[in-house]
Amino acid sequence: MKCNQLVEVGRRQFLRGGLVATAGAAAATMMPGRAKAAPPMALVEYPSNRLANLSDLKLNEPMDIAYPDGDSPGVLLKLGKAVEGGVGPQMDIVAFSVTCPHKGFPLSYNTDDRTFNCPGHYSRFDAEAGGQEVWGHATQNLPQFTLRIDAKGDIYAEGVDELLYGRLSNVL
Amino acid sequence: MAYKRQIDRLPIIPKDAKEFNVTCHYCIVGCGYKAYTWPMNKQGGTAPGANKFGVDLGQQQDAQTPNWYAPSMYNVVKQGGQDVHLVIKPDDNCVVNSGLGSVRGARMAENRRSDVTGTQQQRLTEPMVWRYGTWQPTTWDDALDLVAQVTARVVDKGKEDDLFVSMFDHGGSAGGYENTWGTGKLYFGSMKVKNCRIHNRPAYNSEVHSTRDMGIGELNNCYEDYELTDAIFLVGGNAMETQSNLFLNHWVPGLRGDSMDKKKAQLPNEPHAPAKIVIVDPRRTVTINTCEVVAGKDNVLHLQIESGTDLALFNTLFTYIVDKGWLDNDFIAASTFQGPDPAQAENKAYPAALTSFKAAVAACKMSLDDGAKICGLSKDDIVKAAEWIAKPKDGGARKRTVFPYEKGIIWGNDNYRTIGALVNIALATGNIGRPGGGVVRLGGHQEGYMRPDESHVGRPAAYVDDLIIKGQGKVHHIWANDHYKTTLNATEFKRIYNKRTNMVKEAMDAVAGGTRAELIDAIVKAVDAGGLFSVNVDIIHSQIGQAAHVILPAVESGEMNLTSMNGERRLRLTERYMDGPGSAKPDCMIAAALAQNMERVLRAMGKADYADQFKGYDWKSEEDAFMDGYYAHTGKIVTYDRLRAMGTNGVQEPVVDYKDDKLVGTQRLYTDGKFDRHGRPDKKALFCAGAWRGWQAPGKADEKVKYAFLINNGRSNINWQNHFLDQENDFVSDRYPFPFIEMHPDDMAKVGVKAGDLVEVYNDAGATQAMAYPTPTARPGETFMLFGTPTGQQGNVVNPGVNELVLPDYKHAWANIRKLADAPEAVRGISFKSKEYTA
Ligand code: SF4
Ligand code: FES
């Protein structure tokens, strides 16, 4: 089965639902004005963005998200088994960028073998192995978003482990 | 664990960064890149006026943007002794790759040695000599004197057979015209070394004798031909993985129909359609899957033959096409040999007769029934392939077909006749020297061959690795060859090589503290007693380098100026954009220094005559070597300045002129229908009269019967050649910590292994190890193992059998497989999913 939601993902996609308010708040904390005033950090400072609540997730159904801003689409996934970088009671919830790190085409999710596939030049990445490039042309594995879950079950993204395609700083 | 760099921003290339032309030094395709360097204490900004791209980098850039680079494209390196920022990124303006990078080339920057970021610390920095029971760093003078003193004791004028030489003959990497000339001048000019071999095979010979003997150089078309063609007939090649950007930037447009306008514009008087593709391969590759995705399954025909039966298939196709009359009769009459037959008789040096068309048709005759049976194919599929590649188009126009081939048949059964049979089809259908045509070797490395005449080597050439096993040779000079990872019969080779070189190490250890004369005497005594003195010139301390007595550090492309040509003969200059590590030197300069030391030592020995042969190496730089070699021997047209001005697009060889401030090249060979690669004055192409004769190399037929699994083998897209730099690249070694062996799940069950378990592959020739990778598309009983790796060498189980001209049949090894260990820690967590893209 193909994820139809993802086919529609445009890079300019708007954030939806509960995410909007949080992302708005986060955006305020990462305005360039602040960066100018402070000495540069060893890592860019990532916003903490609420993506969803545990109760919103269905097994192996990718939910569209964006992180750290609306120009960087991703998906949130519950895989049903503990995986690399997984959070939640079952250590099975992960989030990845869906912009191919090779040349920036949008990836689509194959629910059968749980891989992200790129129509650009046919690379594929494993959702169950930390986004490892199973085969492809990108010189990076798929950027994975660092997640945190609070007491209410709200899932927050708070970091990225690889440089996102199309930007020389993960936070613009 | 998927390797993540944890890099979340990169320094921005400032507007005034220095810019250099770079050709990717990895595969044959030779993609164009640009290197940018700038001082450590400077950086560009996001504002359009503050960066090299002139755009607002504070914005997300679109797909395929030229304004982005990955962390693998960045490093900090030395330039003129200073640390500088370095970015090497694909060049959008290069016609070869149009801005595409591959998983190999786009890691060029990351694979540079850096003292700041810590990458490639394995690079050799100083010469080393075996001393006090290990390798000790020393000076060039000390190391070269030892090499020259020992070498001069075992060679004499006209008596150089005790000096064995392994020397790369390729371009790209650390190869190129400068360096092949340097070593060539030393061993084929100053000396006439006969016992020599090339980086990937155990003799000094051609990979493709037959096409050359037929008059046809093997790189005869241009990459655009794949956009103009009606059909591609791919044999034993996996272009998506091993010529990635040739496939993506030229085959895909042809197959998908993106190049239809180009076809109509350039070839207006015939009907056009998107290209179809026939792929001859015993294995289903990712190339096949991708072709199905881009062209549609109906336009892809996978002829999944019985491994090693390509010759039977080509002779069947040839016979069928001739019977149908789908021929270019005018071309055959005008451009091919008309008799009397044979033009060249079959003999020890010619594994098949070379003849007229008519004689070849008679000799190669094979019925559809016989061909289908031998190859394990349906007759319908063979007919379909013949129709796709040769049946005239509506209105009667000749079909345009490209016939690319690679190691599947080069390292396959009956190399000479098989390649000859493929060239027969291309000749008969008039597909050489025409747009949309070509019968071409796809290639591994780039090319960069310029050497004095090598005919003294003889044909068949000496089977050097076998001679070493048999105890011959006293001194061995090795230039970037790693037999331990890439030769055949490697189990035995390593056993003997370790033993013979250890004899010399022991002799050297025994005279510790002695004089230089005592040391030389001890070494000479040891080699006279069956030992081998091994000199290793390389960029890293290789596996065969563990056996060496002297190690000399070389530089790579980019650390020196270097010229090479790609698979469409496109010549470029890669400019020196950084310093080499430590005191490492270009190979050509090492060869020159060695020659000068030989001259000095021989003169001191009173051999003035012989010493004089080692004159002529007073090069100041690699540019002097280029002028002495390439420039002087190719019409004195190409200089560094002229080539630099041609940028990343360069010029296609042969270069014929310099006009209007531009070098003028040659887009395709043989457009005039005159063939000269064989050197025949009549310039007529010959056909190959090579009948099918089953397994050609000794031992193959028996081995096939004796063992359960075919150990087919080859490259993957992520690992460059023998992994010499990639073994220290975290991204790569994280993906495949051990060589994979693709096995059908039923075979894995039989052997009792799970994904990632280590298996031992063993047969009479030896044994090796690999990591099981479940592959449902593999044929049961047929495995595919990654070759050339540091952590399991497939060549260990390849028997010593070679063809008449000493071409190895690496692809045909049969062995048993047993479990060695559960998946090692490094393997846990890596992906074992299908490599095939799914929509
Ligand atoms: S396709 Fe070959 S030449 Fe091009 S970037 Fe990749 S390795 Fe380099
Ligand atoms: S953009 Fe994804 S493979 Fe090229």
Image (cartoon, coloured by chain):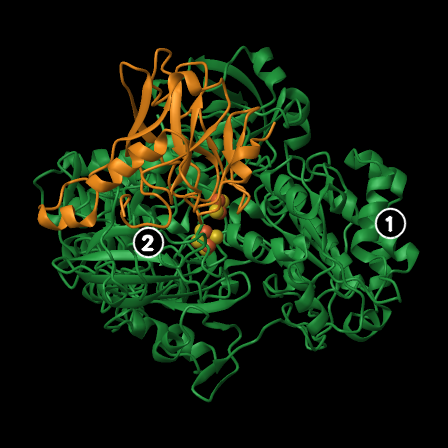
Q: Which residue is mark 2?
A: B59
In the figure, is residue B381 to the left or right of B526?
right
Answer above or below: position of B530 versus A77. below
Count every numbered label the image shows and give the total. 2
Q: Which residue extends farthest bottom?
A: B660
Answer above or below: position of B462 versus B211. above
Disc 1 marks a residue whose amino acid type is Lys
In the figure, is residue B236 to the left or right of B491?
right
Dot 1: what SS?
loop
- Callouts 1 and 2 on one subunit: yes
Q: Residue B226: which quarter of the image?
A: bottom right
Rendering colour (chain B): green
Where residue B565 appears, as percent x and y from the top left, is: 47, 65
Dot 2: what SS?
loop
Disc 2 marks a residue whose amino acid type is Gln
Where residue B536 appears, as percent x and y from the top left, is: 30, 47
Q: Nearer the viewer, residue B809 or A37?
A: A37
Q: Quadrant of the N terminus of chain B?
A: top left
User: Which chain is drawn using orange?
Assistant: A
The subunit letter for the residue under badge 2 reads B
**Residue B547 seen in the figure:** no
Q: Within 8 Å of ligand 1, the CB of disc 1?
A: no
* Few, some or many residues within 10 Å of mark 2 (<14, 14–19, 20+): some
Residue B365 - label: 1
Residue at x 44%, y 47% (from the top left corner):
A104
CA separation in Å, label 1 and label 2: 65 Å
Residue at x 13%, y 36% (from the top left corner):
B132
